[in-house]
Every structure is written in structure tokens, then in C-alpha cells.
Image (tube, helix red, strand yellow):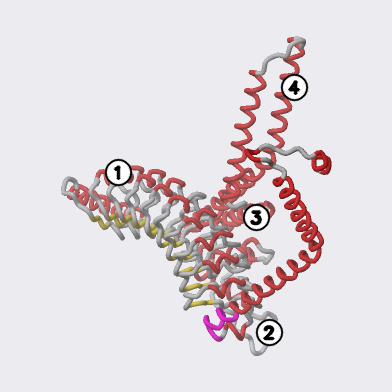
Amino acid sequence: MEPNPSKFPLLSYALSRINSNIPLLGRLSSSVSSPPDPDVEQPQLHRYTQEDYHDHQLFEEMPHLRNPEVLAAMKAAVADVVQSRSILRTLGERPDHETVDRARQTITEIDAHLAKQLEEIVLASRPEGVDRFEWRNQQAENERQCRSDAEREKSVCKAVPQLEEMHDAYEKLLKDAEERLLRIYRSSEGSVNTEEDRSVKEEVNEDVVGILQGAMGNGIERVDLSGRQLTILPEAFGRLRTLVVLNLSNNQLEVLPDSIAGLENLEELCVSSNTLLSLPDSIGLLIHVKILDVSGNKLSVLPDSICHCRSLVELDVSYNKLTYLPTNIGYELVNLRKLSVHLNKLRSLPTSMCEMRSLRHLDAHFNELCFLPQAFGKLTNLETLNLSSNFSDLKELPNTIGDLINLKELDLSNNQIHALPVTFGRLDNLVKLNLAENPLVMPPEDIVKNGVEAVKVYMAKIWLNILVEEEQRSVLEANKESTQTGWLTRSTSWLNNFLTEVSGTVSEHLGAGGRSFKDPYLDQQL
């Protein structure tokens, strides 16, 4: 999590300079108001570098860094930031959400199996001739062995959620350290007029109360509270059961009340551009909501209960800090037609997303996607797909992408894709394609320059050549197998004919009514 660049554009540079070996501390006490004018009579001993220019700009925009106490406090916070980042790098790649869920599910299954084994051991009858004391020892040994085996199996699975928990812990430490860094500088500015701020909030709250009072009992269906500097949404909003549309965008809300579940007829909810850190679990009770916009917040996870909003047609969770989507989101949001997850930190898309058969538009640009699910081709109604700007993470696409028969627009720019899947030529309806800023080898650059149709024709020829080669290989293998098994086929044919003749001979020796006519010679031969 990086400091907010919109409010402190040079804070990242300050971070690096404070923590670097450059003697910035000594230079802060001196006046740095403008670049030194060159002395034409004396040799120039110091060249004004770009680094000096950035320092000058830093002090201009963040003048409180001249304060030694502020700088010392910030330097201590920077040390915590650096340490947390170093530990996170040491931990390695964070496991994706599906892997963590599978590991936890496996642990649960192992525990259930262990409980069943222990129950069988306790209920087992003592065999005859076995001493009671000896039998108890055997049971204790069996129990110990079962527990040991279970722990050995679980140890591998436990490592996955433990790694996830360590990432969570150190990312929280990193977040706290960076926020402390911002608070230190903000406190030095002293530019916030708390009295004025408080009066504005009180005025806004009175406005909201007035809207609530006017809405009660009037069967109101639409409420627009956008841009009101709201920090709190009253619990009483849950009583507006006739509400169909609620717009809370462009406020300062950090939480939504659980009472929002009382909006049983709500079909459209917009809480974009707030400071929401999480969504309440009760949001899953909004079973009639069709459009949900929570973009532009600080969400790091979505509650699993959001999967219960099965009427959703559009879901926008862009501009957040999501690292994964709920595992079962695709199994339950089967009516979803538009999904926007761009500008997050998603490392993968859940496999269940491949079951969103109604999905028409998917925007996942500016994430950290490493791959797409292998069954991605099941999204046969998909029309627009944006996977651009996953940068160094996205290197290949699954072959099943050729099954997206209704795909019209595809953006793969700013990735590390070396080759398009050989099935790419089957995208007959594709009319718009962006492959810029990829190290493509197949198709070559001269083909890409000629446009989407040229790319489709080129990839279709490659696919056709592969099919022809496979067919030729199958014929050769069939001929080879035929040669090797020819003698067996002829032998089998001769044997079948022989048995047929024998069967006819036996039939001739059968008498009327099914009585058999005994022939000693024939019996001996058979």
C-alpha cells in the first residue's frame, strides 16, 4: 500500500531520500530556495543535479520537512515501512484465495475422517481371548497412530493458510507504518480547521435527518445523497422499505450500517467514491438488487455473502484494493452481465467465474493477473474483455479462449504475452483487438500491424496446419498398428470360420425337439 499520491505527490520521493544514504538531514537545515547561480569568475565545483532539483521541489511542496523533529519522527516511521516490506519480500508470493480455501477444506475433511476413525476405535468390540488391559493399550496405540497420520496430512495443508495469515499480519504492519508516516506530516501542517469541519458535518447530518423524516411513510422510491460529505449513514435508513434506488456516492462513508439489509426492495445501490474499508455481511440480504457500485473505495475483500445477491446484473468493484474475489462468486451470480474489477490487486480470477454464462462484459485491466482459469472458454456470451495493463504478470492465455464465439472486443495491451493461443483464429466475431506493448512472436509484428482480420487469418492458418498434422499422425499410427496386428486379424477370422463350421456340424447332429444325437467321434473331437 503506497501513500496517497494525490495529496502528497512527493512523499514517495521523500521516503526514499530519508531512508537513503544521501546526507539529506544535514542539508535540510540550510536554505534550499533555488538552484545556485553559477559563478562565472570561479570554477564551478558543484554541478546542480536532477537529484538537487527534486530535493528543491520536495522542500517547496513539503516545507515542514525542514523541521528536524518532524524529519526525525518520519525517519523512524520509514524504518518500520522498510522492515515490513523486506519481510513481505522474504515471505515470497502470497497464495491465492482459492488455494487457501481448498487447503482449509482439506483440513476440515481430514478432521472429519479422524473423528470417524476415533469413533470406530472406541466402539470396536474386544476380541475373545484378548486381555482387557492389552485391548485398551491397542486402542490407545491405534488412536495415537490415527492422530499422528492426520497431523502429518494436515501439516502440508496448514502451511498455506499460515502463509496467508503472515502476509495479512505484515501487510497490516506496513499499512499502519505508512499511515503513521502520513499522520506525522499532516500533524505538522496544522491546516485543518476542526471547528469549521465539525459545523459542516453537523449541517450535513441535519440535512440527512430532514430527508429521512420526509421519506418516512411516504413510500419514497429514490434517494440521492451524493456529494454531501457524509461520514455516517443513520441506521434509520433501513426502515425505508419502499426504496428502489439509493445513491450515496462521493461522500466520506467508512462503513455501511447492517440495517441496510432492511431495504428489501432496493434494486440499485451506489456507494462509489467513499472511504469504505469493508461491506457488511448483511448486504447479502439485498436479494433484489440488480446494480451495485462500490468502486473508488478502500475495500481489500468482498464478503462471501455478496454471492447471495443473485439478482445482480451489474457489479462494479473497481478502484479498490481487492486481492481476490469470493471463491463461489461465479456459481451464484449466474445473472451477472457486467463485471468491473479493474484497478485492484487481483492475482487470479476464481474458477467459478467460468460459470457466469450470462456475462457480457468483463473489465479486469490494471491488476496483477498471472493467468486465466483453464475453463475460461465457457463464457460463450462474453462480448467485451479487457485484460490490459497486467504488465509483467500476464504472460499467456488459455487455449479455451478460442471458445469465446461471441467476443467482439479484446484488449491485451501492456502485458508480457509472447504468443496468442492457436485457437485464436476461431474468434469469428472479433472486430476490435489491441495487442500493443507485448513481446509478441506469434503472430509477428508485421501481421499485427495489418489489423484484427489479418491476425485472425494468420492464427486460423496455424490452427488448420496443426489439425492437418494431427490427422496425418493419426493415419500413420493407424497404418502402423494395422501392419502389426494384421496376422492377428487373419488368425481371428480363420478361427471364427472354424467355429462356425463346427457349430453347423453340431446343429446337424441335433434331433427334433432339441434332443441331441450322440456321436462318440464328434464328442471326442470337441
Three-letter amino acid code at disc 2?
Gln
Which of the marked residues, 2 or 3, is nearer the chain's N terminus? 2
- Mark 4 or 3, closer to the camera: 4
Q: With respect to residue 344, does 409 lie above or below? A: below
Q: Residues within 10 Å of mark 3 (few under 14, many from 20)?
A: few
Which of the marked residues, 4 or 2, is nearer the chain's N terminus? 2
The spot of residue 423 in percent (x, y) is: 59, 71
Residue 432 left/right relative to 234: right
Q: Residues within 10 Å of mark 1 (few under 14, many from 20)?
A: many
- The residue positioned 40% from the left and 47% from the top of the image is 308
| Marks 4/3: CA–CA distance | 40 Å
Identify residue for label 1. Answer: 262
Three-letter amino acid code at disc 4?
Glu
Three-letter amino acid code at disc 3?
Glu
Tell me whether circle 3 and circle 1 mark residues in contact (CB < 8 Å).
no
- Mark 4 or 2, closer to the camera: 4
| Marks 2/3: CA–CA distance | 50 Å
Identify residue for label 3. Answer: 93
Quarter of the picture holding the C terminus: top right
| Marks 4/2: CA–CA distance | 86 Å
